[in-house]
Amino acid sequence: MKTIAVIGTGTMGRGIAQVAALAGYEVVLYDVFEPALNTAVTLIEVSLDKGVMRGKLDPQEANLAKNRFHITHSLDDAARADLVIEAVPEDLKLKHDLFARLDAVAPRHTILASNTSSLSINSLAGSTHRGDRFLGMHFFNPPHLMQLVEIITCDDTSAATVELAQSFVEQLGKTAVFCKDTPAFIVNRVARPFYGEAF
């Protein structure tokens, strides 16, 4: 994989885009609102500059990452990536509609992934005709600091797709954990009882 697209420019979308650019991927950022795209790039650049100031990033590495961003409000452009990661709000209908549109315009080889923290991957995959190239890829907040990524398969996800997803996550310098499409996946399912006890 050489190019990834991130759909949505909120906190998670920006963070995923940042770590992907630092890992050497060309990154297409998509949002329906053009001002949101410009704001996202500015915030990512500020984050990279802070990394340099704190001695966490090499200045040249940060500058190279900045040059790997491409912004678009055309879903057709975003869908041409090798991997498309959806990071829009946790609204099932919104995600269903988005994946149906992506599936209609993306090349056959493109892998579609959702950053959902709790919605059914099988349900989301049902919006497409590429269940073999569909999975969940759940990053934790903030993505540039948190090392774990959950890879969630649907019933039809192929072994080749899982391998490509794992390779991508490892290229980001992160650790992949694997699970089937179960409620809340692994981390949130384990953590929720502790959250309840805290209250």
Image: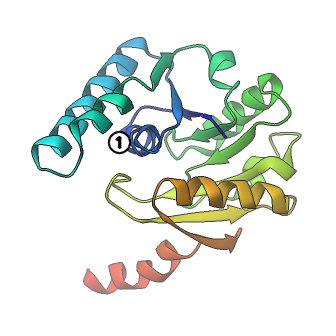
As displayed, is residue 111 above or below residue 33? below
Which quadrant of the view contains residue 121? bottom right
Q: In front: 104, or 18?
A: 18
As displayed, is residue 54 above or below residue 50? below
Q: In front: 56, or 10?
A: 56
- Name the residue type under label 1: Thr
Q: Residue furthest left?
A: 53
Report the quarter where the N terminus lies. top right
Please report the residue visible at 48 percent of the width from the left and 72 percent of the height from the top: 188
Report the quarter where the C terminus lies. bottom left
Q: Position of residue 111 (x, y in %)?
A: 74, 42
As displayed, is residue 46 above or below residue 169? above
Please report the residue visible at 49 percent of the width from the left and 75 percent of the height from the top: 187
Task: Judge the density around disc 1: few (<14), some (14-19), many (≥20) Cα neighbours within 10 Å.
Answer: some
Residue under label 1: 11
Please report the residue visible at 39 percent of the width from the left and 20 percent of the height from the top: 37
Which quadrant of the view contains residue 15? top left
* Image color mode: rainbow
Figure disc tally: 1
Please report the residue visible at 46 percent of the width from the left and 45 percent of the height from the top: 23
Q: Is residue 124 left or right of residue 87?
A: right
Q: Position of residue 57 (x, y in %)?
A: 24, 46
Q: Position of residue 46 (x, y in %)?
A: 20, 32
Q: Position of residue 92 (x, y in %)?
A: 63, 45
Q: Is residue 45 left or right of residue 19?
A: left
Q: Is residue 109 left or right of residue 58?
A: right
- Circle 1 SS class: helix
